[in-house]
Amino acid sequence: MLRHLIACLSLTAAVAQANIVIGQSVPTDGESSTAIAGRALALGASLYFNRVNAAGGIFGEKIDHQVMDDGHDPKRTLANTQDLINKKHALALVAYSGSLNMHEVLNAKVLETAGIPLIGAAAASEDIRNPGSPYFFQTRAGYRQELQRLVKLLADDLGVTRIAVLAQQDDYGNSGVADLKAELQKRHLSLAGTAWYDRKAQDLGSAAQQMTKLNPEAILLISVSTPAARFIKAYRESGGSAQLYGLSPIQYEGVIQTIGKQSAHGLGLSQVFPYPDDTRLRFIREFRQDSEAALKDSDAPRYAVLEGYLSARLAVEAIKRAGKNPTRAGVYNALTGMKRYDLGGFVINFDETNRLGSNFVDVVMVSSTGALAR
């Protein structure tokens, strides 16, 4: 369903004989949680580009949104980026996915070499945020900031002292555990325990048993959607009763699809974008207007769709500010001038030296109906 929506929207752009190419490399093939999120990022960007094209484009020129599948493989992400730059002649890049993938792109210095801006990525480990790249304009708070928010909620606001962690065995998990330990140490606390899992593993039963025996008050999940869901189910079935909180890479729709609403009930999640149903914000009202038809009867993770949509909006705004016959340098300069740019209740702040556009972190919880509560 989601692949079909992206294909239809891309076809609409292609028929229009577009001549402003905006590129994107994300995982799109398969049913893994990373592929589902990648398709959602692409869908969100396509929704906004389609809106702009339907209104006549940018200064009469239509947008050609080129989406390339990278299978969540960092080497393919780099190869796709080089193709988008050198063969597709992209003016800008938007909404990539994956910390390791971004490591590959940033280490190769392809953005600097081509002078092309990349706007947004669903990746927020501290080592890609700082130093990052002058050409990587980041739209989300970091995982460290998410952990800071969750520890503040648990330790400072709720008085929880025995906090354990489930972590993925990779850079994402390693850096997350280190950041969590640092936050606890500030409060003279230490981790109650750590359970690691192989990201390719299907069975989270041993980790669940370990945490049940440990019996902490709360467990933070430094994970992605599918393994987080499997852990939650196994943990609850083994009699575990701790409060469970996860980071933004866990899409609540994917958790519910895997284990059902009742098992997901009570899961808390940090989020780095506004609640997609908060229609008090003009930004969210416009997003819902553009996405309502596409997301009806769709299981696409809405926060990921919103993230792609946001990156597309920033790209279009920068191209408009760059003027007719925009160049990569013009778009780059326009982005550096987006100081406190208010999209309608959500503010992005870039300048000549700052590429960390947002520090926003919210906490939501899955209700018994499968909706989110704040």
Image: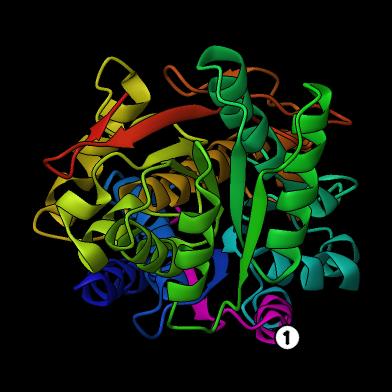
The mark tally for this picture is 1
Query: As rendered, which of 339 and 30 lies closer to the eye?
Result: 30
Report whether 196 appears left or right of 114.
left
Query: As rendered, which of 317 and 217 lies closer to the eye?
Result: 217
Q: Which residues are magenta?
A: 59-82
The picture places residue 119, in percent across and down from the top left corner, at 64, 49
Q: Quadrant of residue 8?
A: bottom left
- Please report the residue visible at 81 percent of the width from the left and 24 percent of the height from the top: 188
Other residues around mark 1 within 10 Å, as few (<14) / some (14–19) / many (≥20): some
The residue under label 1 is 75
Quadrant where the N terminus is found in the figure: bottom left
The outermost residue toward the front is: 213
Name the image colouring: rainbow
Residue type indicated by callout 1: Lys
- Please report the residue visible at 43 percent of the width from the left and 83 percent of the height from the top: 202
The picture places residue 306, in percent across and down from the top left corner, at 39, 44
Question: Is residue 64 something that shows in the picture?
Answer: no
The picture places residue 36, in percent across and down from the top left corner, at 37, 70
